[in-house]
Amino acid sequence: MIKTKAEIAELERQPVTSASKNDTSGGAVTQGDNPAYVALASQLASTQADIKSIKKQIQDISQQKNNYQRRIEATPKLRRNTVP
């Protein structure tokens, strides 16, 4: 178990663009060559764009809420028991 954790840690320290020790093709594997990496990078970019858009929507709605709150506070308050 400890050996496996050490192996995992060693693999994580290796750069992503280096060739695998078990790779018999002799060529280096780059991030662009890895379809899983390309798919995940695309999903990440899409998710980051969604987050940015949603943050903008939250900001706009918060500003609208503040404007409505100011309008409500500026409206004269109705008196209770206006009839004597």
Image (spheres, grey):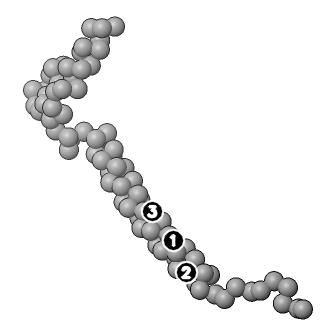
Q: Quadrant of residue 27?
A: top left
**Camera-side residue of 16 and 38:** 16
The label shown at residue 80 is none
Q: Which residue is found at the position 41% from the left and 59% from the top?
A: 50
Residue 29 appears in the rendering: no
Q: Pointer 1: residues within 10 angstroms few (<14), some, or many (20+)?
A: few
The span from disc 3 to disc 2 (Cα, nearest Å) is 24 Å
Task: Tell whether 27 sits left or right of 8.
Answer: left
Q: Name the residue under label 3.
A: 54
Q: Which residue is found at the position 24% from the left and 39% from the top?
A: 34
Q: In terms of sequence position, does the residue under pointer 3 or pointer 2 come before the other? A: 3
Task: Tell whether 77 sits left or right of 3.
Answer: right
The span from disc 1 to disc 2 (Cα, nearest Å) is 14 Å
In the rendered view, tell whether residue 1 sits above or below residue 66.
Answer: above
Amino acid type indicated by mark 1: Ile
Q: Where is residue 38 in the image (x, y as percent from the top left)?
A: 28, 45
The label shown at residue 61 is 1
Q: Which residue is found at the position 81% from the left and 83% from the top?
A: 80
Residue 59 appears in the rendering: yes
The span from disc 1 to disc 3 (Cα, nearest Å) is 10 Å
Q: Which residue is found at the position 41% from the left and 57% from the top?
A: 51
Q: Pointer 2: residues within 10 angstroms few (<14), some, or many (20+)?
A: few
Q: Where is residue 76 in the image (x, y as percent from the top left)?
A: 66, 88
* Labels 3 and 2 touching (C-beta < 8 A): no
Q: Position of residue 62 (x, y in %)?
A: 50, 70
* Labels 1 and 2 touching (C-beta < 8 A): no
